[in-house]
Image (cartoon, helix red, strand yellow):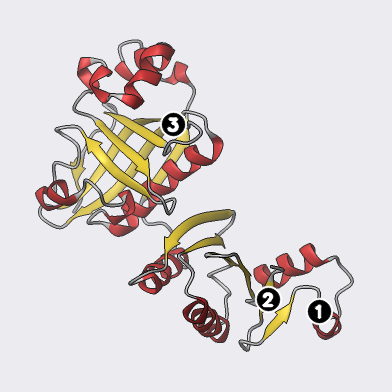
């Protein structure tokens, strides 16, 4: 179906509506008009599929009436999943299952997207940045072992076998925890007990979990390994707030007819380390 634009008053417009063009005094093409209205006027674009929907918006400017009309539209159509694209300086995407409490998840995505990311930074680094003894460097240079480790993490070098998270894509495109090493997420026994089968986004510090999930979704989109320098202040409800600094390598395994798998392996950055925040 053709996209629909929901304006700042909650009114629905066909994306090619001449009346909307007249109201906005627009002389640009349909795609540019939709982009302008979303980024500057608080409009929402929705596109319906057979059992899915796609939503595009900018949380910082979206109008409350437009959001209300969006929820009503989704409630009436009852899609199985919703692909949400939002702009916070660049476009980001997440797939939300709509059954059950999907509306809560969508609300959380939008509310979090309105806020600046607190205390997190990650940046791509060249392999040469890692020291000669860093086990991530040895793993990255061994392409056969790297690919095999995504299938079976026990193939990881010994120093890394306790430092991995393995994610697999479910039928709705969500990335769920399949397995993890013995020392991962050790500051939350509660999360370690329930992590398998849950989304990586649903960690106890939800903002951090969702931020981590964004890195894995980026690798899923590109299909390429990602080596990063990561720094984050994380709230662990059972033990307090800690500042973490680590190197992270995320490796994808994308095979036609099989769920996408993503292996994340980390090594603490010894120059910064881990410390409790006060």
Say if 188 sits above or below 130 in the image.
below
Does dot 1 land on a helix, a strand or a loop?
loop
Foreground residue among 117 and 207: 207
Q: Residues within 10 Å of mark 2 (few under 14, many from 20)?
A: many
Q: Position of residue 111 (x, y in %)?
A: 42, 70
Q: Are marks 1 and 2 in contact (CB under 8 Å)?
A: yes
Residue named by callout 1:
17
Foreground residue among 7 and 118: 7
Sequence-first disc among 3 and 2: 2
Q: Residues within 10 Å of mark 3 (few under 14, many from 20)?
A: many
Does dot 3 land on a helix, a strand or a loop?
strand
Q: Residue at x 66, y 68 (%)?
A: 39
Residue named by callout 2:
5
Sequence-first disc among 3 and 1: 1
Say if 63 sits above or below 234 in the image.
below
In which quadrant is the N terminus drawn? Answer: bottom right
Residue named by callout 3:
252
Asked whether the viewer can see residue 186, the reply is yes
Cα–Cα gap, marks 3 and 2: 35 Å
Q: Position of residue 114 (x, y in %)?
A: 47, 68
Say if 237 sits above or below 160 in the image.
below
Q: Are marks 3 and 2 in contact (CB under 8 Å)?
A: no
Q: Residue at x 10, y 48 (%)?
A: 189
């Amino acid at each position: 179906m053709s996209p629909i634009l929901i304006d700042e008053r909650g009114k629905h417009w066909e994306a090619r509506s001449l009346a909307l063009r007249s109201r906005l005094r627009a002389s640009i093409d349909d795609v540019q008009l939709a982009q302008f209205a979303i980024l500057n006027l608080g409009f929402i674009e929705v596109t319906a599929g057979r059992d899915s929907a796609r939503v595009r918006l900018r949380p910082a400017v979206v109008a409350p009436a437009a959001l209300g009309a969006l929820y009503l539209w989704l409630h009436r159509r009852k899609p199985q999943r919703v692909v949400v694209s939002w702009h916070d300086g660049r476009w980001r995407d997440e797939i939300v299952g709509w059954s059950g409490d999907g509306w809560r998840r969508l609300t959380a995505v939008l509310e979090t997207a309105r806020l600046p990311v607190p205390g997190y930074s990650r940046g791509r680094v060249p392999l040469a940045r890692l020291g000669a003894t860093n086990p991530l460097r040895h793993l990255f240079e061994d392409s056969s072992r790297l690919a095999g480790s995504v299938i079976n993490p026990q193939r990881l070098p010994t120093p890394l076998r306790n430092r991995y998270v393995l994610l697999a894509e479910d039928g709705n495109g969500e990335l769920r925890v399949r397995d993890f090493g013995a020392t991962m997420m050790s500051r939350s026994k509660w999360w370690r007990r329930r992590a398998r089968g849950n989304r990586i986004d649903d960690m106890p510090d939800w903002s951090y979990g969702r931020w981590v999930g964004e890195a894995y979704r980026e690798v899923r989109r590109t299909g390429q390994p990602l080596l990063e320098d990561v720094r984050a202040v994380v709230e662990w409800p059972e033990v307090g707030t800690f500042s973490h600094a680590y190197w992270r390598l995320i490796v994808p395994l994308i095979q036609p007819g099989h769920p996408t798998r993503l292996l994340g392996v980390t090594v603490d950055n010894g120059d910064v380390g881990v410390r409790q925040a006060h």
